[in-house]
Image: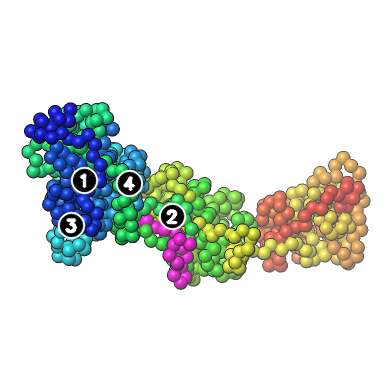
Amino acid sequence: MVRHLTREHGEEAAIPAEVALSDVLPPAPGQEADGSVPGRPPARAEGLRAAIGRDAAGVVALDLVDEGPHALVTGVTGAGKSELLVSWVVALAAAHTPEQVGFVLADFKGGTAFERLRALPHVAAVITDLDASGAERGVRSLRAELRRREGVLATSGARSVAETGGALGRLVIVVDEFAALLQEHPDLAAVFTDIAARGRALGVHLILGTQRATGVIRDALAANCPLRIALRVTDPADSRAMIGSDAAAALPGDAGGRGLAYLRRPQDAVPVAFRVARTGAQELAVLTTRWHGATQAQSPWQPALPRRLHRAGLAAAGQGEIVLGLADEPEQQRQRTRTLRVGEDRGLAVFGGPGSGKSSILRAAVAQTPDGFLLPADPEQAWSVIDEIAEGRRPVPPLLAVDDVDRRLAAFPLEYASGWAERLQRVIRLAAERGGTVVLSASRCTGQLSVLADLLPERALLRAASRTEHLTAGGEPGSYDPDRPPGRARLGGAEVQFVLPDEEPAGGAAPAARRRRTTLRADTPRWEPRALLVGVVSPTPSRTAETLAARFGLAAVQVLRDGAPVVLPEGEGLGDAAAEAGRIRGDGGGAGRERAAPREPEPGGLLLLVGDADAWQRQYALWQRIVRTGEVVVLAEAARDLRMLAGVRELPPYATPHAGRAWTIDRDGRPSRVILPAPQGDVSPAARPAA
């Protein structure tokens, strides 16, 4: 079959059944240092001459500059297309330095043929199976490379790379399965068409491999790819589109046909049949050793951001800065450390769904500066710290981190959620005025969150739970990625991988800087009576009285019950007021059992009177006397009674219901949160506080 093909073109000798690349490569340095192919004229320094196989007459060598500037390669699976592309790259690397030529190698069907070429210093990048974000990076990277080269030409006054005197090396972009690339990422078609049109002057060359040419390669692109190689194809139309004849469709599909191809250069009247040279492991190893230590070719395509990032691998932050992460800027052909200037930058809002890494971002930021603090997770603490800063009772910290703002708001009752959000807005404004920086995080940006986020200059959008939440947070439709790794966000138009918090050493032997307290706290004192007569408001008086009796003694506690007198200690001057108040009903705590007789309080001793709102309204004269001369305690479960009985109009500090929390009222009518004594075991019915 091979002889038939060669005779068809008037050739006497047969095409070899197999060709090793070492048989056609130029001699190594020291033998023929001009980079020439044996039996061929020496390669010009500004050209890209490479030997890729043998035809009936001898070595087949191509010059991508003179005979290109771009090439198309077609061939069905198994025809040897990937082997041809690998050998072409290796042959170019053997004949040229990394300064003269660099490669970006891409395979969009998951192939591994190019992986073994990574060790060559000429190879700037190897790309496989781009996702949507990777394709966008590719578009921006390639356009940036074209702009960079245009700038070099403009600066040097040159019209093409050949006139720069070696200041600008050539770049060869090799794509296997180009059709698969365009099918998955059609936006890249315009970039490749642009490269094809402008690549000659800029020194950027394309070698595009595809199984089919018709219906895949646009006319504008094909017109700039005069160098054509067709291995076996199944459709004669593909063969004609590539080489002007049906010959490639007639190539055998057996093992002997693998690596057989037709070449048509601009100067060829008819296509030339040849055997593609195969690159063996030994040949590649020799070449890799030969170029060991050579300068790596500059890559127009930055490596993908790491999925996990530690601060130790990044450039150190400047004075007053903390490291946020690594920003990917393909349009600038760089990746740079993204920082936050504490006290100068107003802050950042971080949005992301569960597991997206938002809490880690805040912890990492706070850990980097002694001036950074986290808001406590506890709702009471969170309320009080923000309230104290908003009201000027606590200074604005240089860096305040507030995690899970939406969850915090949801944990508060409606009135408190609104009040806390208003106070947090005030804190953000105060921080901007007084040199503070605030970092917030939340799962979604709705309602009050959108108002808070609008007060901060930047947003980092991590992986959202849905496209809707991504858009609501301010994301662009095309930037939604449900597969973002934790810590990966869109920030300022760039992809950023945020750093992880520093890991604590084993055994807890952390440096002092790490052992410092990074969470702000607000004091909630344990309650101790400030007066001998105390009125306690509780929706469950008997239960509360039992708890207080365990701490202060049975004689010090009485429950306001229906049909039971109130016994006051001598010397308090309240006996008449109590007697005039009449009988009150209890909370049901004594139903069905014998009522104990009131215990006489010790003269001048402590007396805690416990009742619900109804009981105290019936004993209103006594209540008023306690308000004036004693102490009022309202349990957190009786929050609505604070306004009705104590006349408190302002929103008191948040207190968690059913957690032993209460408010005391000072002489000016201001409530303070306190911690009541914890229950210390059951009090038997016979020993319950007196009624």
Numbered disc total: 4
Give the mark nearer the N terminus: 3 vs 4.
3
Estimate the x, y position of residue 355 in percent, counting from the top left.
52, 47
Q: Does residue 438 appear to the left or right of 504 in the view shown?
A: left
Give the labeled residue for mark 4: 282
Q: Are marks 3 and 2 in contact (CB under 8 Å)?
A: no
N-terminal-most mark, 1 or 2: 1
**Residue highlighted by disc 1:** 24
Q: Are marks 1 and 3 in contact (CB under 8 Å)?
A: no
Query: Label 2 is placed on what type of residue?
Result: Gln
| Mark 4 or 2, nearer chain start | 4
The amino acid type found where label 1 is placed reads Val
Label 1 SS: loop
Q: Position of residue 616 (x, y in %)?
A: 77, 54
Q: Which mark is residue 497?
A: 2
- Asked if the residue under mark 4 is in contact with the one under mark 3, i.e. CB atoms within 8 Å, the reply is no
- SS category of the residue bearing label 3: loop
Three-letter amino acid code of the residue under disc 3: Asp
* Residue 60 image-quadrant placement: top left
